[in-house]
Image (spheres, grey):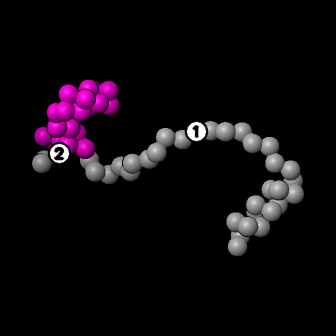
Amino acid sequence: MKKADKKIMSADGIADLADKEKSVSKYSTNKGKMRRPLQRVNVDFTVEMLQELDDFARE
């Protein structure tokens, strides 16, 4: 497929097509990576625990 043949559509628009079980392959560049959603958490560690984790990571 030529570059000019690719249509520009928002992510929501592509998701709507996918929900309707329509093909969305023409909107893909195959350059991205699938990533799992992240969840941020805050954790408090003692200095000793951080040192132990650092030592383990170096091994």
- The reply to whether residue 14 is in sight is yes
Location of residue 47 in the rendering, given as x and y in whole percent from the top left corner: 87, 53
Q: Which residues are magenta?
A: 4-28
Tell me the quadrant of the picture where the C terminus can be found: bottom right
Residue 11 included in the magenta stretch of the image: yes
Give amino acid for label 1. Gln
Name the secondary structure under disc 1. loop
- The reply to whether residue 8 is in sight is no
Image mark for residue 39: 1
- Figure quadrant of residue 41: top right
Along the line of sight, the residue nearer the viewer: 49 or 24: 49
Location of residue 31 in the rendering, given as x and y in whole percent from the top left corner: 32, 51
Give amino acid for label 2. Lys
Along the line of sight, the residue nearer the viewer: 4 or 31: 31
Q: Residues within 10 Å of mark 2 (few under 14, many from 20)?
A: few
- The image shows residue 45, relative to residue 9, as above or below, that is below
Identify which residue is drawn at 20% across, 38% down.
24
Residue 15 included in the magenta stretch of the image: yes
Along the line of sight, the residue nearer the viewer: 35 or 1: 35
Judging by the rendered image, the residue that carries numbered circle 2 is 3
Residue 5 appears left or right of 42: left
Name the secondary structure under disc 2. helix
Identify which residue is drawn at 28% across, 51% down.
30
The Cα atoms of the two marked residues, 2 and 1, are separated by 36 Å
